[in-house]
Image (cartoon, grey):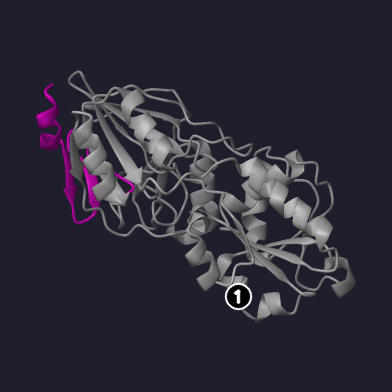
Amino acid sequence: MKPDRFDTWLKVDAKGLYCRPGGFYVDPNGAVSHAVITHGHSDHARPGHAAALATPETLAIMDARLGEGAPQRSQSLPYGEPLTVGDVTVTLYPAGHVLGSAQVLIEYKGARAVVSGDYKRGADPTCVPFELVPCDLFVTEATFALPVFQHGDAAAEVAKLVTSVAQFPERAHVVGAYGLGKTQRMIALLREAGYDRPIFIHGALQSCCDLYESVGVALGPLVPATGAPRDELKGAIVLAPPSAIADRWSRRLPDPLIAFASGWMRVRARARQQGIELPLVISDHADWRELTETIAETGAEEIWVTHGREDALLHHIGTTGRRGRALALIGREDEDQ
């Protein structure tokens, strides 16, 4: 199949990317009859679907987070197992983004299209690493698709946090981290760095941590931060949702030192504007180098770019002789940067 024929069976409409011969949407932005879900973040896993296909872990996350809004019918598909859906074959491969995250390989009449969802190539002890999938069409995210975004080594960023705790033993180190994925990765990286003390967590993070533990991701001793004795919080690491690090909840902690783990912390002006004393450049998305290298390594001649900084990436794609196209997918948010 020629590259210019993909848009005859993969289309974008008001609800997102639709696979016509399969009869399903990938990560639709509203309730649909049939959906394939790449991962459990709320901007990809919406409530109200009649039926959804995803990895077992993503379905568990959707059940836990969506409650009655979880899919009425769900089908679990482990990584690497092909499944016939309508007139196409669907196979899920690890995306390395968060627990259960998947790329979606769709095969139709000899053509191979991969929808990446959100992905990263960096090491993450809490999820299966990204697996490169050769294809003819690659539909990629572009969250950090500017050359300035070079995320670097997450372990080195965590080392900065551990060093700061040792330097300021009277201060509570409050780390802003998104609830699904980033929090658990931060905890696991701290454990890998040899930090074996209890880690205090905001109550809003507990359920996702419990979910990770239930599927075998060991996080070590976690203690609720709310209600903890003030003296115990001195020199402690406290993880909290980004919304909590700037409100009264964090101000009641002993001399809080505010940190934030995000790819956006590469932009120092943004960190200063948010009052972040210790910016930690730790992202669950691919940076510029990972995006451009992945595009080349897939062998795809056609690249469709979804949410993010499309212009720079499309320019780069054009310089390599590939065909690039921006997809106007709405509803993507910043839950997981």
Give the side of residue 31 with respect to residue 216, left or right. Answer: left
Count the marks: how many? 1
Residue identified by numbered label 1: 246
What is the x, y in percent for residue 312? 27, 47
Q: Is residue 19 magenta?
A: yes
Query: How far across and how far down the image is residue 171, in percent?
Result: 80, 68
Q: Residue at x 65, y 39 (%)?
A: 215
Amino acid type shown at disc 1: Ala
Secondary structure beneath label 1? loop
Image coordinates for residue 77, horizontal then vertical, percent:
44, 31
160, above or below 268, in the image: above
Q: Which residues are magenta?
A: 1-27
Q: Residue 256 falls in which quadrant of the image?
A: bottom right
128 up-or-down from 111: above or below = below
Name the quadrant containing residue 201.
bottom right
Q: Residue at x 44, y 43 (%)?
A: 287
Image quadrant occupied by the N terminus? top left
